[in-house]
Image (cartoon, grey):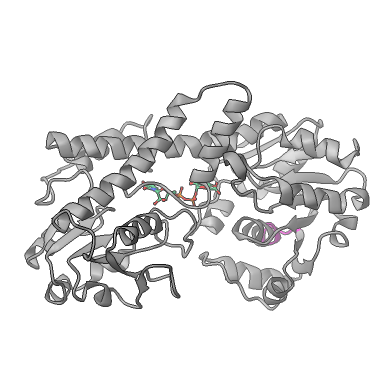
Amino acid sequence: MSAARIVVVGTGYVGLTTGACLASLGHRVTCADVDESKVARLAAGRVDIMEPGLAELVARGLTSGNLSFVVGAREAVRDADGVFLCVPTPMGAGGAADLRAVEQVVAEIADVLPSGCALITKSTVPVGTARRIQELTGRPDLPVVSNPEFLREGTAVSDFLGPDRIVVGSDTPGAADWVANLYADLGAPAVVTDAASAELVKYAANCFLAMKLSYVNAIAELCERLGADIEPVTLGMGYDRRIGRSFLRPGPGWGGSCLPKDTSALLRIAESVRFDFELLDAAVEENIAQRDRVIAKIAGAVGGRLAGARIGLLGLAFKAGTNDLRDSPALSIASVLCAHGAEVTAYDPAVQGELPGMLVVDNAYQVAKGADVVVVLTEWSDFTRLDWAYMAELMHGDAVVDTRNLLEPRVVLDAGLSWQGIGRPRAGARVTSVS
Ligand code: UGA
């Protein structure tokens, strides 16, 4: 396809990744944001988001001239072929997605968009939003297209440039094909459909992943009660191609800026059409139960009394590879521990600064100093390289709770410490052989 003139509104991790990647595919991209200082930083090639490869792509786009940054979208869209809406759609009152930012942008630009310009939603929006945007513009000459993103934080650039699939939907004939074509060079399968179906794909996919994780966490709990080991159990499940091997790691519960918000939004969407989505509801409840089980495990490790216990946390981000703390299970667990009167010290290689109730330190050994228990909450590989014998020397107690099954139990046990994972025998690994 020949280069298109694209405007991306919103420079969060979705917008910036979309803009920089589309520019790298040869399109002429302008990224607009309301935050003047952020625009100035980006225009100078400074990327604040921790996203591998993104700063390099931004720099390349700026040098080639394919990528530019402006404050406000109104002027930028006047000669656009397509406008991507990448503004936040946070969880609003009652759990539904809050669409105010999307509506504000549409109101700001609707009257200056050239006829035929596609308005494309990338932000996760409730089913029916494309129709609503069409009404808001009052302009039948502007096709509205849903093109949900499937980017994971920490691998957003590689997810964008090597996607499993592209999903595009529109009720205007030809518009979805035009958007799908923007990605033609990526060679990914494209699902081209109506707007409502494309909008639903995003929720259906994220909520499926959340259910898969809640299921795995529940199976891990069963493993503990039945004396089985979750590692060979998930290995044995994962070889079944219908199940797949990814997203089978148990943990302290799923979090982040997407899964919690999208599960809640889909429950509200189901409610709005009087469908009782019990299956999804149960997955959300199970996620809360998982967090509570982790807290009970930590309490058990300090003799049942959290008040006054010295607890060292390894990891605060909702997963490794990001500094994002939004809806992080680690933070939620930390705040419950603090509320019970525990003295909490935490270290995360990507997080600095102050957090309420706890002491955030700048290396893992400081976390161990005087700790009754050390808890791994985020699966940073750095933690596997710690000197556990030295950790043991620094600690007051001897308990390690590993909510990511990250550490090699033998290494921890050999250091004279006890080790507990999730869904695993306390003494560590059962022999698992694959032939
Ligand atoms: C998620 C989806 O994976 C993306 O496809 C989607 O585009 C994105 O939301 C979005 O809607 O924008 P992300 O929020 O970056 O991506 O995080 P995930 O990698 O999905 O992880 C979500 C949570 O599940 C984390 O708390 C993570 O630690 C947990 N997790 C993941 C596990 O506990 N076990 C696993 O095996 C995998």
Looking at the image, residue 260 sits to the left or right of residue 190; the answer is left
Q: Taking 142 as reference, is 54 above or below it?
A: below
> Is 272 situated left or right of 232 in this image?
right
Any magenta on residue 25? Answer: yes
Indicate the quadrant where residue 306 lies. bottom left
Magenta residues span 22-27
Question: Does residue 249 show up?
Answer: no
Measuring from the top left, give residue 248's x and y in whole percent: 33, 41
Asked whether residue 396 appears in the rendered view, the answer is yes
Residue visible at 74% across and 72% down?
36
Judged left or right of residue 277, residue 282 is: left
Give the residue at x 72% y 37%: 129
Quarter of the image where one finds residue 119? top right
Can you say whether 221 is above or below 330 in the image? above
The stretch drawn in magenta includes residue 152: no
For the C terminus, give its image quadrant. top left
Query: Which residue appears at 56% of the width and 58% of the height?
Result: 157
> Which residue appears at 79% of the width and 68% of the height?
71
Q: Is residue 349 left or right of residue 136?
A: left
Q: Quadrant of residue 226?
A: top left
Q: Nearer the viewer, residue 282 or 386?
A: 282
